[in-house]
Image: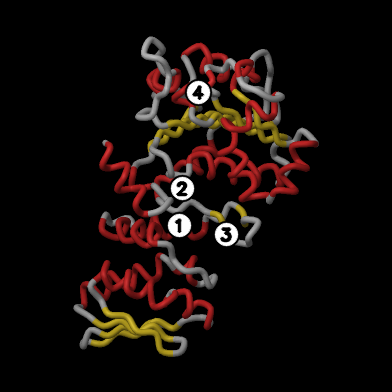
């Protein structure tokens, strides 16, 4: 229950001590970040959050607390990237759209955290995967392109809407010629596929991931291994697609089988192909920009959900 007075004082009742602890953060860290961002002073007394300041700022601060409620209400500290994303949405008049993020829970991590899109564009991307059989996502590192697709794939798998999850990426650093690398096949491809395994481990845990791979329910393989196959009843994710050649992209897209979905992710500013090779992702986005049944999503530096410095680093190199 929220009360307001003409003196510029808001009170928000908190549901639990865990929520109060999450809102304050270690050493009042969250409160300090919140105050710096909004210009409003915050105090937690028991199970009440008190805010004092100029009325327009108080109204904005109160809305910001509500937008981040799905996080702190669980007893989880609000990450700075989520706080800033909510603040940006408020300033752009997109509060209602941002509020929908809290309802878009895709799964729970092995650690028990709710996994959901954290920005409006991320939610649009997830919606696209749900509603289209072929989705392209273009954006910088750290915007959740592969992670969100993998989370959604895990949910579709648990709901028995698909039978397999297939994750692949070009081994461009090895020129797709893995014969030059030492060790057996698994040892050769692991360095290039490790980021995909990291996403799976975060969602399923190490033991379940390995069990699903052994059963063939999850497959992680280099892009070259997709040739000649028809991929039915699966969600197939192509990561680092900017490093697929035009021929490889055409080969991959034509693998789409019945009752399957494809997600193609990449960052067109990070192309590692030789100078005489064109990116298949760049070509595909041009070819299919107006094709029915295909959705192209674009994420920006504002959707980066890693350390807050990553946004600044990306901006510096642009």
How many residues crowd around disc 3 within 10 Å: few (fewer than 14), some, or many (20 or more)?
some
* Tag 1 secondary structure: helix
Q: Which corner quadrant of the image does residue 316 belong to?
A: top left
- Residue 56, image x and y in percent? 21, 73
Provide the residue designation for mark 2.
123
- Residue 133, image x and y in percent? 56, 30
Quote the CA–CA distance across marks 4 and 1. 40 Å
Q: Earlier in the sequence, mark 4 or mark 1?
A: 1
Q: Report the mark closest to the observer, 2 or 1.
A: 2
Colour pattern: secondary structure
Check contact, mark 2 vs mark 1: CB within 8 A.
Answer: yes
Provide the residue designation for mark 4.
173
Quote the CA–CA distance across marks 2 and 3. 15 Å
* Closer-to-camera residue (127/298): 298
Quote the CA–CA distance across marks 4 and 2. 32 Å
- Residue 178, image x and y in percent? 61, 19
Quote the CA–CA distance across marks 3 and 4. 35 Å
Q: Earlier in the sequence, mark 3 or mark 4?
A: 3
* Tag 3 secondary structure: strand
How many residues crowd around disc 1 within 10 Å: few (fewer than 14), some, or many (20 or more)?
some
- Residue 314, image x and y in percent? 32, 42
Provide the residue designation for mark 1.
100
How many residues crowd around disc 2 within 10 Å: few (fewer than 14), some, or many (20 or more)?
some
Q: Earlier in the sequence, mark 3 or mark 1?
A: 1
Provide the residue designation for mark 3.
114
């Amino acid at each position: 229950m929220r009360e307001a007075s003409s003196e510029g004082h808001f009170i928000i009742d908190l549901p639990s001590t865990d929520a109060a602890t999450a809102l304050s953060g270690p050493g009042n860290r969250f409160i300090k970040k919140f105050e710096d961002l909004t210009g409003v002073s915050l105090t937690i007394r028991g199970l009440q959050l008190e805010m004092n300041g100029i009325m327009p700022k108080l109204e904005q601060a109160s809305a910001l607390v509500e937008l981040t409620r799905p996080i702190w209400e669980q007893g989880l500290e609000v990450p700075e990237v989520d706080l800033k994303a909510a603040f940006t949405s408020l300033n752009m008049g997109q509060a209602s759209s941002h509020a929908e993020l809290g309802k878009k829970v895709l799964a729970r991590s092995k650690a028990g955290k709710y996994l959901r899109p954290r920005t409006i564009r991320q939610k649009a991307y997830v919606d696209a995967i749900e509603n289209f059989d072929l989705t392209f996502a273009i954006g910088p590192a750290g915007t959740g392109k592969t992670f969100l697709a993998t989370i959604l794939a895990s949910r579709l798998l648990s709901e028995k809407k698909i039978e397999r999850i297939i994750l692949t990426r070009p081994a461009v650093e090895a020129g797709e010629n893995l014969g030059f690398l030492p060790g057996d096949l698994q040892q050769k491809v692991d360095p290039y596929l490790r980021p995909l395994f990291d996403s799976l481990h975060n969602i399923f845990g190490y033991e379940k991931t390995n069990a699903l791979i052994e059963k063939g329910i999850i497959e992680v393989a280099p892009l070259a291994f997709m040739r000649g196959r028809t991929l039915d009843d699966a969600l197939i994710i192509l990561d680092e697609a900017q490093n697929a050649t035009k021929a490889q992209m055409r080969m991959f897209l034509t693998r789409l089988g019945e009752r399957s979905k494809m997600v193609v992710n990449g960052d067109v500013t990070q192309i590692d192909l030789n100078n005489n090779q064109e990116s298949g992702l760049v070509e595909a986005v041009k070819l299919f920009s107006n094709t029915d049944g295909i959705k192209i999503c674009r994420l920006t530096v504002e959707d980066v959900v890693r350390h807050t410095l990553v946004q600044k680093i990306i901006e510096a190199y642009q």
